[in-house]
Image (cartoon, rainbow, N blue to C red):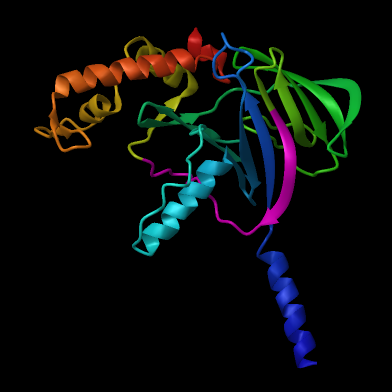
Amino acid sequence: MNKIFKLLAFVILSKFSAQNHRFIYEYKYVPDSTKVDSVLTENMRLTIFKDHSEFLSEMKAKRDSAILRSSQKGGEIGTDLSPGNIRSMVLKNKNDIKNFSIEFIGIESYKVIEENSLNWKLIDETQKIQNYNCQKAILKLGNREWTAWFTTELPFQDGPHLFRKLPGLIVAIEDSRKHHSFRLIANYKTSDNPKIEKNTKLMRSYEVSRKQFNKKWSEFRKNPVGMNEQFALMNPSISGYKIYDANGKELDLNEYRRSERQKTKRNIANNNNFLDLDLYR
């Protein structure tokens, strides 16, 4: 009887320690609109907790967890863990109040409060995707038109990125230009803790509206600066530091910053097709 009781207790504890639901989406996107055949892929995770859900890169989440574990043990993380290409993260509250995304302009992070209403149009059309019976829905967001397929077989009104508020979980969604698509490829329960703090403590994270962020990003796009110069602008009290190359030779700071600006300009030119096309207005 004692063994049976212990086994029963273990089963009950296991059940309640893994009540969070995680959905993995394959994200395919075209970073450069002038090269539509150049498609990148990165897996993204949507984790649904009791009072909110979080959406971020699977690679970033794993690397951040490894860094945290390493720092707690006083060690260093290996260089074999890639942070992935997608740095932005999304937090959606169950009460739909103060949903936000964490976005970056260079090394500067912003907590962008989402105020967009999602006016879905349900279409009387169905198909089976990933063994789920799905219905079609259409939405206009970020100056794009999106086609989503959702299923009521999964009891969550959520989906990848900012997409949510359909009568079920979004299994697949794609924009009309076929530049961005998300497709559900796995789901399971997890006991992981939240990755995104509601009062986020990321490096100097400014709280702004989506309109304010888009304006700041547009200004940066027109007059980009490199990481070193941006760090100096963010920390005016720090001065007199020097830059050295791999061989320990001191570099000319102004020349180094000019080189960084050119590199940033090239990066912006090659990544000109974000999810939110309103950034380019």
Q: Quadrant of the N terminus?
A: bottom right
Q: Is residue 36 magenta?
A: no
Determine which quarter of the picture holds residue 242.
top left
> Which residue is depicted at the point 53% across and 13% down?
278
Res 215 seen here: no
**Residue 23 appears in the figure:** yes
Residue farthest toward the front in the current orientation of the protein: 247
The percent coordinates of residue 145 (x first, y second) are 69, 14
**Up-down: is 112 above or below 121?**
below
The residue nearer to you, when weighing 124 against 243, is: 243
Point out the residue furthest to the bottom here: 1
Residue shown at 20% from the left, 29% from the top = 232
Residue 238, image quadrant:
top left
Work out whether 62 lies above or below 140: below
Residue 236 position within the rendered picture, expressed as x and y whole percent measured from the top left: 16, 30
Q: How many marks?
A: 0
Query: x and y percent of residue 100 in the render?
Result: 52, 33
Residue 192 on the magenta segment: yes
Whether 136 is drawn above or below 199: the answer is above
The image quarter containing residue 141 is top right
Q: Is residue 223 left or right of residue 20?
A: left
Q: Nearer the viewer, residue 121 or 159?
A: 159
Q: 83 above or below 33?
A: below
Horizontally, residue 207 falls left or right of residue 165, namely left
What stretch of residues is rendered in magenta? Answer: 182-202
Where is residue 210? Give x, y as percent.
49, 22
What residue is at 69 percent from the left and 44 percent from the top?
23
Q: Is 182 situated left or right of 196 in this image?
A: right
